Image (tube, helix red, strand yellow):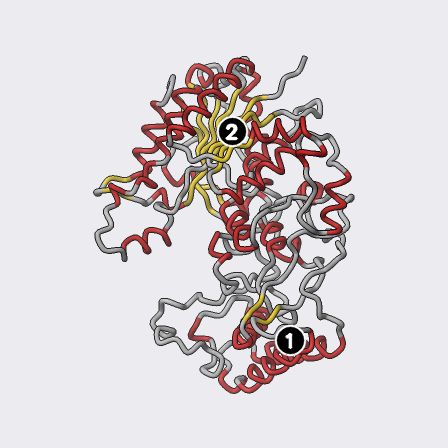
Amino acid sequence: MFEPIRIVDLFSGPGGLSEGFATCKNKEGQNAYAIGISVEKEKAAHRTLRLRSFLREFSDFPPEYYSWLKDGGDGPDWKDLYPDEWLRASEEALCAELGTPDATELLSGAIKRIGGAANGRTVLIGGPPCQAYSLVGRARNSGKKDYVPAKDQRHFLYREYCRVLNEFSPAVFVMENVKGMLSSTVEGLAIFGQVRADLESSGRGYKLYALSGDENTELTPQHFLVQAEDFGIPQARHRVIIVGVRRDIASRLPHWFSPRLKKSERIVTVADVLSNMPLLRSGLSRNDSPAAWREAMETAIQHVEGSIANYSGEDKGTFVATVNEVRARLASSSLQGRWSPVRTPLPATIPSKLRSFLNDPRLSTLHGHETRAHMPSDLSRYLFAACYAIAEGSSPKSPKFPPAIAPQHVNWTSGKFDDRFRVQRWNHPSSTVTSHISKDGHYFIHADPCQCRSLTVREAARLQTFPDNYVFLGTRTEQYVQVGNAVPPFLALQIAEAILPIFDYV
């Protein structure tokens, strides 16, 4: 009887890695992997994780799920409707802080149970929290008085991952982290070198593999950097991903074998995944209504038109034509909703495998496709930036903003805010979707100037390649954080496929 490979998922977030592995099929079309346990400390992310674990209990999601997405509200009482499935999901998705005694005890019991039934076919996945490694986080920490990197335990959370490697001794592990890990140091020592050494010596010992790069050269830190846009993700997301194979298993692999991601035939763009979504207007931070928004948009257009004399781009004609088009569309369209009750088809330009991954024909609406509110003064900046991106092919840096539109910040011209407003261009992958999207929308301006807004949670989730039926729970701010912190599930699927042949030798 076929038994799937068992997964232990640490620092799970909303479940991006888990989703990719859980959807991976073997040659017979069976689910190649099954999640044994996943652990996440943030309550909202854990709720999302548990809901998805529950849904995986069914070959077809329950009808009540689709009714809830269509009708809205707080959602069904799953525990009452499906007590057995909900209990199994609650046992699989744990809300616990790794490294604490309680979490260690819970995890140890689960590891013994999973390892005992898996016949050696096990994988450890996860990404220790990365704030201390990220370039932004390091800049923020450097400004803190009395900050001592060696005392920041976030630098060493990967050691909890290593502790589990020692206890679990999986056949394979996959660890993900931010690019900044490659250059982060503590007391002058490169953290990545220590991470590699600790991973290699954990448990019974592991041989490390890089998923991209030239397999015929000696591995360098840069070989472990995966650029997601090379592999069909509509986002320029660069992350460190380390694959480890237990040495006794690695010794059985053919000398030529190395788990590799296959580059996609073409780059997937923002337009590929967002262009056919229902059109939504932005909201206003005060006194919002369709009429007030149209009035605010008319004022924004006038501000932009009034600054054309100070336009510093190369293609002023296209810029002016784009602004005129926005005015015409605004006059002729019925664009007034901040959310849409309908679900439009996925764009035909999406590559078929990704399209199939995102699509669920049973959906009648898109959960989380609702705009947030912006200050009226920001509408003119969003409008200018989006029109500029269409005319010039790039998002404008702060010196390109006319004085009449630029924010009245004392540091606006200091160089620290050059990228304060960033448009996600139609014909390119997006910039990296991060948890900062929860703070404001300035870094994530929609490519369509007529909508004049930041991205919705669902749009950010599309760029992260979460399936359209993947629901994020919690407040909207918490949902944005979950999406930004996740591993793109479609990339996780490809990782799961790349390491699958290893289990022929376990």
Q: Quick one: SS at disc 1? A: helix
Q: Is residue 166 above or below residue 52?
A: above
Which percent across, then down, holds residue 283?
61, 69
Q: Amino acid at mark 1?
A: Trp
Mark 1 vs mark 2: in front = 1
In the rendered structure, the answer to whether residue 220 lies left or right of residue 358 reads left
> Which residue corresponds to the image point at 64% horizontal and 33% vertical from the top-left?
54
Sort mark 1 into few (<14), some (14-19) or many (20+) by Cα contacts within 10 Å. Answer: some
Residue, disc 2: 259
Find residue 263 and report its horizontal and vertical position in percent: 57, 40
Identify which residue, 397 or 89, lies in the foreground.
89
Estimate how packed mark 2 is, as few (under 14), some (14 to 19) or many (20 or more) residues with alpha carbons within 10 Å: some
Residue designated by label 1: 293
Q: How many marks?
A: 2
Tell me the quarter of the picture where residue 391 sits. bottom right
Residue at x 71% of width, y 79% of height: 328
State whether residue 348 appears in this view: no
Query: Which is nearer the eye, 114 or 7?
Result: 114
Q: In this image, 416 relative to 82: left or right?
A: left
Percent position (x, y) of residue 488? 56, 43
Say which quarter of the image contains residue 191: top left
Q: Answer above or below: position of 451 versus 352.
A: below
- Looking at the image, residue 207 sits to the left or right of residue 153; the answer is right
- The answer to whether any part of residue 240 appears in the image is yes
Q: Residue, x 41% and y 26% (percent of image)? A: 104
Q: Position of residue 338 (x, y in %)?
A: 67, 64
**Mark before the other along the chain sequence, 1 or 2:** 2
